[in-house]
Amino acid sequence: MTYGYRLNIEDIYLDAADRNWEQAKCEMKDVKELDPATAKVRIFRGPDTDQGLKSAVQAVVGWAICLEAFANLAWSQSVAKQMPSSEFK
């Protein structure tokens, strides 16, 4: 894949992840949970509906795809990768 198309696809994934996170934030509520180790009630912000959970997961997965793609692009352009393996330390 050429460099320009690759960046456009990563940008599309990043925009989709950001939109999913904004939607997930709207569905976040205070959720009570019992800590099994201490038997104390903990309160955290979490998705209240299945759609909110789905949006949050899609956002995290989208960010992970973008991060991996950018790291792969940086690695493929790095000097260390272009060196012979005998010189790479």
Image: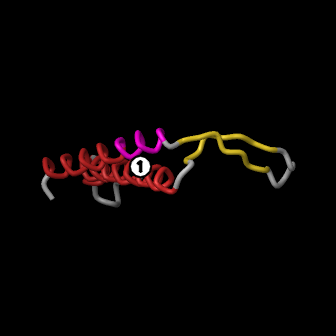
Is residue 56 toward the left or the right of residue 65 in the image? Answer: right
Label 1 belongs to which residue?
59
Q: Position of residue 32 (x, y in %)?
A: 72, 45
Q: Position of residue 17 (x, y in %)?
A: 36, 47
The residue that appears at 84% across and 53% down in the rendered structure is: 37
The residue that appears at 86% across and 48% down in the rendered structure is: 38
Q: Residue 35 versus residue 72: which sits nearer the camera? A: 35
The residue that appears at 13% across and 47% down in the rendered structure is: 4
The residue that appears at 59% across and 40% down in the rendered structure is: 29
Quarter assignment of residue 31:
top right
Q: Position of residue 57 (x, y in %)?
A: 47, 54
The count of marks equals: 1
Is residue 51 toward the left or the right of residue 12 in the image? Answer: right
- 23 magenta-colored: yes
User: Which contiguous range is marked in magenta?
Assistant: 18-26
Q: Position of residue 62 (x, y in %)?
A: 37, 52
Q: Is residue 21 above or below residue 85?
A: above
Disc 1 marks which amino acid?
Ala
Q: Residue 20 versus residue 86: which sits nearer the camera? A: 20
Q: Residue 28 versus residue 72: which sits nearer the camera? A: 28
Farthest residue in the right direction?
38
Secondary structure under tag 1 reads: helix
- Which quadrant holds the N terminus? bottom left
Mark 1: give few (<14), some (14-19) or many (20+) Cα within 10 Å. Answer: many
Is residue 86 toward the left or the right of residue 57 in the image? Answer: left
Q: Residue 34 versus residue 1: which sits nearer the camera? A: 34
Most common secondary structure along the magenta stretch: helix
